[in-house]
Image: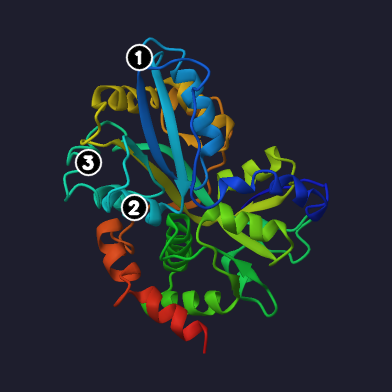
Amino acid sequence: MHTIRHRNRFLAAAAALAAVAALAGWAVSPQGRAAVRSTQLTLVAYSTPKDAYAKIISAFQKTSAGKDVSFNQSYGASGEQSRAVYNGLQADVVAFSLAPDITKLVGPGLVDKSWAKNKYKGMVSDSVVVFVVRDGNPKHIRAWNDLVKPGIQVVTPNPFTSGGAQWNVMAAYGAQRKLGKSHKQAVAYLTNLFRHVVSEDASARQALQTFSTGKGDVLITYENEAIFANKKGVHTDYVIPKQTILIENPVAAVKTSKHLAAAKAFVRFLYTPQAQEIYGDNGYRPVVKSAAAKYKFPKPKGLFTIDAPALGGWGKVKRRFFDKSTGIMVAVQKNARK
């Protein structure tokens, strides 16, 4: 277990996060208007990395490949963003929370089937699932079992809209399996956990904002969100449980882009040490080793991936847990409300 503590009062700084409230939900913000640029790319992304991409885009525009490129940016819940592109939202580059939100776009010919064939398997940044707690951790929340103690109130996004929420669910389920529990016992834990959930926002960023208003005792979220909050003046404590999941965030160029060469150039730039260090500076774990070496992100002893035997990878997990008709989480949410 690794705990990072900040002594400032959490709620006293909540107003600071309100200043970035526009990052939640679906927002489009043009970039690069100061100069006349001949190529405009649209980046459609999940809810949390807006600050990182603002800096990465600025750095890209200083390169020969990016000097004539401007950007529109759209941020929102990963699943909703993927569905929007699937249903016709124009995009040149997609950056989502989890791989299935990109593979969904392969079938209709929006993303090339080889999108994950590079040495990083299409992943551009990593993170881990953590617990954000009130200043000083007054409820002594350190492990998954602490989340289901009497009176504990949990904030986590809706797993049917948010990629971050799906990572949270699989972290909780996988942790139970890692602790030796059976599938049935791990699902029972999920039901118990969701009985403690007091808010299911559409995205991870909205969940952070809800927690910042004082709702809940613990927020389950990306490590980078806890770091983001502190950078914005909302001082939090967060705990990395011993058993947690490695979050892997994918990116891809869109095949139907009118500026495919520029889109691919931007995706390539994301793997440069310069871009990877910007991810690192914004709380994400770089996937490029030379960049990752500059940061001291802790590695929990019980860290596991979505491909762990008890989980079986996103292909299996999406059908088994998150199908809107037959998924395990449909029953979990229903039973949790009884």
Between marks 3 and 2 in the image, the one whose residue lies nearer the viewer: 2
Label 3 sits on residue: 111
Q: Is residue 329 above or below residue 287?
A: below
The residue where tag 2 is placed is: 84
- Amino acid type at image mark 3: Val
Residue pushed farthest bottom? 338
Q: Residue at x 45, y 22 (%)?
A: 290
Position of 114 compared to 294: left or right? left
Q: Amino acid at mark 1?
A: Ala
Residue 186 in picture, x, y percent from top left: 43, 74
Inspect this view and state whether residue 241 appears: no
Upstream in sequence: badge 3 or badge 1: 1
Question: Which quarter of the picture shows residue 20?
Answer: top right
Residue extending farthest top: 64
Q: Which residue is mark 1?
A: 65
Callout 2, which amino acid?
Ala
* Percent of width and height locating residue 215: 70, 66
Secondary structure type for disc 2: helix
Dot 1: element? loop
Q: Are marks 3 and 1 in contact (CB under 8 Å)?
A: no
Q: Which of the pair 154/69 is nearer the observer?
A: 69
